[in-house]
Image: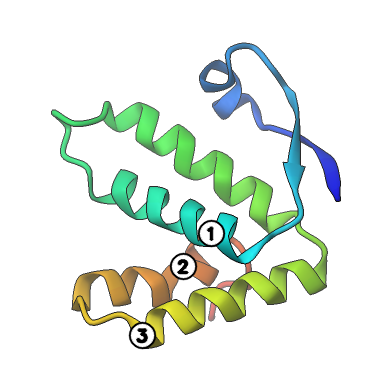
Amino acid sequence: MWRVVRWPDSAFDLLGGRRDVFVPIPDCALAEALVNVLWFIDGSEDEQMDPDDAVKVLEGVAHVVSTLPGDQRQELIELVGEMAAAETDPARREFLEEFPEGFGLIDDAS
């Protein structure tokens, strides 16, 4: 199943001028691939990726996943939790543990 997502202005240029894109409902393999890409972007040095572009991508993804319906949001939270539990690299595990809050899947713990 696919749905149309409207990207925020900050991600507009990175999408080649497209504002409306089709995004698949979360799937285990796709979600894992997305998290892996975000981990790479988050850890990239300035020489690897322009910091402004990295922020645009991370914010764009945060916007999209924060608008997922509750059941899909919960599915992604559970998947990332399973990934964190299985992770042996402490830095990556921390990234995965902070992912749900950092990417807008859950409200800030205040």
- Label 3 to label 1: alpha-carbon separation: 20 Å
Q: Which residue does the image show at 53% across and 80% down from the upper left? A: 109
Residue 81, image x and y in percent?
A: 49, 82
103 and 38: which is toward the camera: 38
Q: In the rendered structure, which disc, 3 or 1, sits on the residue that comes first in sequence?
A: 3
Q: Is residue 34 above or below residue 59?
A: below
Of pointers 3 and 2, the one earlier in the residue sequence = 3
Which amino acid does the dot numbered 3 rest on?
Ala
Frontmost of labels 3 and 1 is 3
- Amino acid type at circle 2 is Phe
Residue assigned mark 1 = 103
Relative side of 9 to 13, left or right: right
**Contact between labelled residues 1 and 2, with CB atoms less than 8 Å apart:** yes
Residue 87: image location, x then y, percent: 31, 80
Position of residue 46 measured from the top left corner of the image (x, y, whole percent): 17, 32
Residue 52, located in which quarter of the rendered image? top left
State how far apart marks 3 and 2 are (Cα). Answer: 15 Å
Secondary structure beneath dot 1 equals loop
State left or right for residue 58 relative to residue 45.
right
Q: Are marks 3 and 1 in contact (CB under 8 Å)?
A: no
The numbered mark at residue 86 is 3
Judging by the rendered image, the residue that carries numbered circle 2 is 99
Which numbered disc, 3 or 2, marks the residue closer to the eye?
3
| Quadrant (top left/top right/bottom left/bottom right) for the C terminus | bottom right
Q: Nearer the viewer, residue 34 or 74?
A: 34
Number of on-image labels? 3
Residue at point 76% right, 55% down?
Answer: 25
Under circle 2, the secondary element is helix
